Each structure stands twice: as C-alpha cells, then as structure tokens.
Amino acid sequence: MNSNKKGLNTICTHVGELEDKQYRGAVSPLYMSSSYAYEDVDVKRYPRYFNTPNQEGLCKKVAALEHAEAALIFGSGMAAVSSALMAFLKAGDHVVLQQTLYGGTYNLVHEEFSKYGIEYSFTKGWTAKDFEAEIKDNTKVIYIETPSNPLLTITDLEAVAALAQKNGLVSMIDNTFASPVNQNPIDFGIDIVIHSATKYMGGHSDICAGAVASNTQNIDRIFQLAKNFGGSLSDYTVWLLERSIKTMGIRVRAQNENALAMAQFLENNDDIVKVYYPGLPHHQDHDIAKRQMKGFGGMVSFELKPGIDSSKFQKALQLIKPSMSLAGVESTLLSPAKTSHALMSAEVRASQGIADGLIRFSVGIEEVDDLKADILQAIEKVK
C-alpha cells in the first residue's frame, strides 16, 4: 500500500485521507486501507462494531505502521490477543505457543482453551526447531512474542514464518515490547501482528487498548468474531490513542537510547547479578535482534545481588516508580513474579527462568544521569 512508503513520523502524525465530515458523524466504513472498506452492509455501520469514524482513521494508521493491509483496534491488549487466537481456532484444533509469554496470554490459554476443546503446546525454547517439535496434524496456529515479557528473549521471525508457511499454519506475534518503531514482523513473513496498544502506542500510562494488523482477509475473519466478543474501544479512548501515536516515533527512539545506556550501567554494577537486554552484545539472541530490529526497545530486566531485598529496593526509589504500567514516558519497574506473571505457578515461572527477585524496568525519557543516581541511592539504602 502506498502509505507504507511514507516515513514513520509522517504516518504517526497523519491519520489518512479522511474528510472532516467523517468526524462530524457521517456513516463510514468498518476499517480502511488503500483498497479495503465496508460501506454497503448496514450491520457494519453499527458503532459497537468497530466502525466509528475516528476508529477507521486510527485503524488505517496502525495498518500503515505495521506494513499491513488492514487493522482493528480493541478495548485492551488481551481483547486483541483472545480475538485473534479464537478467530483461527475451534474445537479439535491445536496451537503451538512460545514458552516465554506474557502472563495474561499464558493464563488465557491455560484456563480457557480446554473449555473450548482447543489443544495447545508450549515450546521448550524459542527457536524454530522448538516450534517444529510441537507441531501436530491438527495444529493451526503458531504464536510467538519477541522481545518476550519479561526476559526479553528474541525469536527469529523469518525462521518461524517460514516454518508456519511450510506447514500451512497461521503465524501470530505479540509485538508489544518492540513497537512498530523497532520491528515490523509482516516484513519477515509473519501473518498477524498483535499489540497491547496500552503500552508504546499509548505511551502515557492513561489508556487501555489493543490492536491487530494483518491482510484484509485475516482482519475480516477476526472482525466476525470480535463483533460478538464486544471488545470495541470508546471514541474518547480512540482519540487519546491517536493523539499518542503522533509522538510514538520520537518517544520510542528516546527510550531505546536510554534503555541501552541503563543496561550498560546495570551490567557494570557489582550489586546487579544479571541484566537482560537484547542490545547488549553478550545477550544470547543479540545477533538475531540486530537482524530484525531497528532498535532494541525500552525494556530492561535485571536481578539484584542475593541479600538485597527487591521490594525494599523498589520502595527506596525516588524518581523511578514501582507501577503495573510500562512503556510510558516515565520510568517504572515491577516484580513480574508478583504482578504480570503472578497468575503462573511458581514452578512454571521457575521453568521459564523468571526468578522471584527479577525486576522488569521500563525505561522512560528522563535524563539518564538522574535514573542512574536514583538506582544507586536506592541500593545503598537497602544494602
């Protein structure tokens, strides 16, 4: 599509060729791309069905950002995840999922899929061979997340896409941690891209939203289910999200720069025993990350030296705030074992390498020297 050839900042700033009258309440299509729109089916005009005018413009923008033909936006990241998965799975089907996943996605699969007669397997690792080992005759979908939450493992997009295509499977990715600024999975052959738009697309810790981008056929299939699941986004939140995407390119690039500086600082601190960041040369997946990412992202995870209480450390911070949110312009951190991955059992977390003392650090756009000073003073207080 022609809009994909525009620069990132241009895409982020301009909604598309929408006339002012659409924002005054004119009936318009469900979602738009350069060649795809519904205008002549009354049910598609019902506002609850993802088709208010500002939703259409935002969907067009998300599609352009992810080099896709079309997109849908949702009321949350989990609404996007569940709608995408359930649109391609039915009783008797099987899905292969990456071992290292967001805890909410893991819980969705673990708690709900058996009720629908859907089989699933989690890989033992995150290479293409790990996925291939779990494919069955009834497998329909491969689901990945890269960089992963919270250990920032990197999955080879091209290899997984080729594996899915060879076996006639649909490939899906949670691209939240990378954002469209740093990674465009469709360019590597992935079929469906999912975002918790609450995070880098939102960027200000004030909304909850999700997004899915793909070709028009896949988006239409997801819509047919999504209209029944009811995960649509309010007009006001759509407006806030569209506002936020205008600055996403600038924000994410600043977060990339700060995160790399903080990861280097943390790995050279004797009170930090392990740092997870794909931009570090010694990261196990650094070479893959260099090949498929334009930037390494704003997320860093680390483990404090034994004897330093992670909870007390977080409470001692003055600038960086312990928070459930991430990817905002302000720096935040949390303990995955107590928050994002608390729904997993301790045994499952341990099998994935998620230590109880692990801290996930979402680096914001503050001055790096201020962030360093805050971490140093907090460590000194609790040592």
Image (cartoon, rainbow, N blue to C red):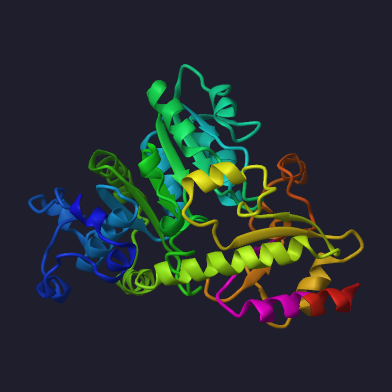
Left or right of 345? Residue 105 is left
Left or right of 360? Residue 101 is left
Magenta stretch containing residue 373, yes or no?
A: yes
Which image quarter: residue 284?
top right
- For this orientation, the residue located farthest to the top is 137
Q: Position of residue 117 (x, y in %)?
A: 49, 29
- For this orientation, the residue located farthest to the left is 40
Magenta stretch containing residue 346, yes or no?
A: no
Q: Is residue 377 visible?
A: yes
Chain part drawn in magenta? 360-375
Q: Nearer the viewer, residue 130 or 238?
A: 130
Q: Position of residue 200 (x, y in %)?
A: 47, 64
Q: Is residue 327 visible?
A: no
Which quadrant of the figure contains the C terminus? bottom right
Q: Nearer the viewer, residue 147 or 233?
A: 147
Residue at screen point 30% across, 50% down: 67
Q: Position of residue 245 (x, y in %)?
A: 37, 68
Left or right of 117? Residue 265 is right
Q: Nearer the viewer, residue 101 or 48?
A: 101
Residue at screen point 58% across, 43% down: 287
Residue at screen point 48% across, 75% down: 204
